[in-house]
Image (tube, rainbow, N blue to C red):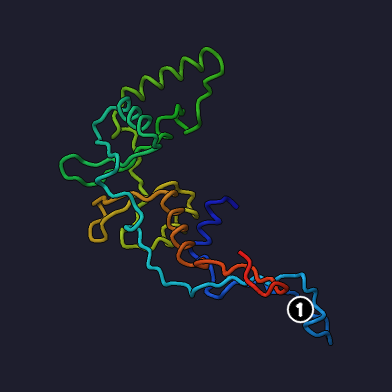
Amino acid sequence: MTIFRVLVCMTIGGLLPSAAFALSQPQPPTGASAADINPQSPSRVFVSTPSKNIQRRVDDFMTPRSQMHILHPQVSCDEAISVLLSRGISGAPVVDPESGKMLGIISSSDFMFKDYSGALLNMEGSSESLANCVEMAQKIVGSTVEELMSHQVMTIKSNEAMATAADWMARNNLHRLLVVDPSDEDNLVGILTRSDVMRDVMTVVQATLPERATGVVDENAGGLQP
């Protein structure tokens, strides 16, 4: 199980129970008294507050459209590749410049050299194979984003729960989800990535873990050890 799937399971499951955590001193054998327990064994008590009911929605963690890198359909693939590389991202939504409606998404995988069956071309084979790759590269660079983009886009509404988004991403092995307006699914309002899911996990952790540990009680000293 990948780390991301573990984090998703933690997110969907609520992460932690509301009960306090404690590592208590050993229990005495049957018939023994508390005095029979090794006095050198300290008791560790960790105090926790009850779990808070955190309402976490997609629009609380997504990157809003105003901060996204958006491409237009008539942009050349040469320019699109430069944008993705310079921004350090692997994909970007494609939006109609006039209507503002979402048309699809372009990803780094769309620029890979593939044959008609979809298999990757071998760039280290014969001179003929290399020539095919060069020809394919020229075609890709000479194409527009509209010609190579994917029209099948995984979207989620901005008012959906983060747990729903995390589950969907894990089940379908997605790196990102485009976020749309609940009342207009063609209206792109943001993007949600795996990094956003991890930020959500940390939000739950900080809200449900014990606010602080009381320390270690040393029974011999009769005081609280830091």
Residue at the top extreme, as displayed: 127
**Percent position (x, y) of residue 116?**
44, 30
Looking at the image, is 49 positioned above or below residue 176?
below
Looking at the image, is 165 positioned above or below residue 51?
above
**Percent position (x, y) of residue 123?**
52, 20
145 to the left or right of 27: left
Front position in the image: 204 or 150: 204
125 to the left or right of 201: right
Residue at the left extreme, as displayed: 98
Q: Quadrant of residue 112?
A: top left
Q: Amino acid at mark 1?
A: Gln
Residue at the front extreme, as displayed: 221
**Percent position (x, y) of residue 140?**
36, 25
Q: Quadrant of residue 146?
A: top left
Quarter holding the C terminus? bottom right
219 to the left or right of 85: right
**Percent position (x, y) of residue 204?**
46, 63
Query: Going 34% across and 49% down the picture, which residue do you hit?
Result: 191
110 to the left or right of 99: right
Looking at the image, is 201 positioned above or below residue 35?
above
* Residue marked by disc 1: 27
Front position in the image: 140 or 183: 183
Looking at the image, is 101 positioned above or below residue 115?
below
Numbered disc 1: secondary structure: loop
Front position in the image: 30 or 214: 214
Query: Going 52% across and 66% down the picture, which residue do you hit?
Result: 212
Query: Going 48% across and 52% down the picture, which residue do you hit?
Result: 172
Query: Going 59% across and 70% down the picture, which residue do you hit?
Result: 46
Number of other residues with Cα within 10 Å of mark 1, as a class: few under 14, some 14 to 19, many 20 or more:
few
